[in-house]
Image: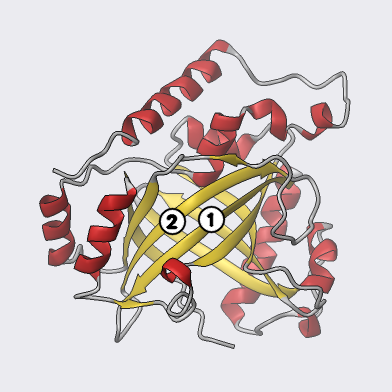
Amino acid sequence: MAQDNMQLQRWELKYLIPEEVALALREFVSAYLEIDEYGAHRPNLSYSIHNLYLDSEDLRIYWGTINGNKNRFKLRLRFYADSPDPQAPVFFEIKRRMNDAILKQRCGVQRSVVEAVLGGQLPEVVGLVSQDARQLAAIQRFIELSCELRAYPVAHVAYDREAWISPHDNSVRVTFDRNVLISPEFSARFTSEMDDPSPVFGNGVILELKFTGRFPDWFGEMVRVFGLRQGSASKYADGIAVKGEHHFLRNLSMGGKNFEVGLAAERKQARLSRLARLLDGTSISRK
């Protein structure tokens, strides 16, 4: 199995850019970083990522992002391909934002034990991809948070990622995410098929600059030369806002009659404000 190059703690800056700028940036970035091995021999240098996001019945995690809570987190299950193999890996991830820093915890488990973990059970050692202590701590914390929120799968988010990494360490990563799609998903099924998917950012490309130390000088030059404007681009939260919250409320989708939809005036305004920022970001152009 290839090395896991995920940065566990980092700074992260996002930009929503058009495809022509992304292609020009690829040439610029290639002078400093090398293409990730997973995308090196694939079309458009990209590989597919599938995330199954968990949330509470009242979408508390979603609203934490919409309302701009400083210390917030997301719970998701990540997989990379369709596979009938019960030993194929699924990665339980906690992505936490602490002010401007991103902290991630991640544990890989075999698909055969996913349902048990979602039910609140710690997997047996044989069901783990790695016995690294950090991964064990991650799966324990994931279970604690999901049980506390009574979280369940609500959304399937898929996209194509082009990733560039530091040649000697993992201190710097630059990613381009394209074709971001979202669809409601209330079960733990791991297939690339999506029911009634909706595009989240249209033809826009999400550029992410990720670094673990100080801001690289060449990042600053790149931002200046290409006239990049930093913004927000949450695949999960923006996806729900674009498609509509009601699609992701399980009780409504399953015919429940007693579930209150959280569309109070303040929440409606928060969603509209975020959508306005999102639409403004799509107008970014190269200067």
Mark 2–mark 1 CB contact (< 8 Å): yes
Q: Earlier in the sequence, mark 2 or mark 1?
A: 1
* Residue closer to the observer: 215 or 70: 215
Q: CA distance from mark 2 to mark 1?
A: 6 Å
Residue at 81% x, 50% y: name it: 187
Q: Is residue 22 above or below residue 234?
A: below
Residue at 87% x, 32% y: name it: 254
Q: Position of residue 17 (x, y in %)?
A: 31, 46
User: Can residue 8 be seen here?
Assistant: no
Residue at 71% x, 20% y: name it: 261
Q: Quadrant of residue 91?
A: bottom right
In the displayed orientation, state which residue is furthest to the top.
265
Would residue 10 appear left or right of 84 to someone viewing this image? left
Report the residue marked by disc 2.
Answer: 177
Looking at the rendered structure, the kind of residue marked 1 is: Tyr
Report the residue marked by disc 1.
Answer: 159
Q: Position of residue 141 (x, y in %)?
A: 65, 61
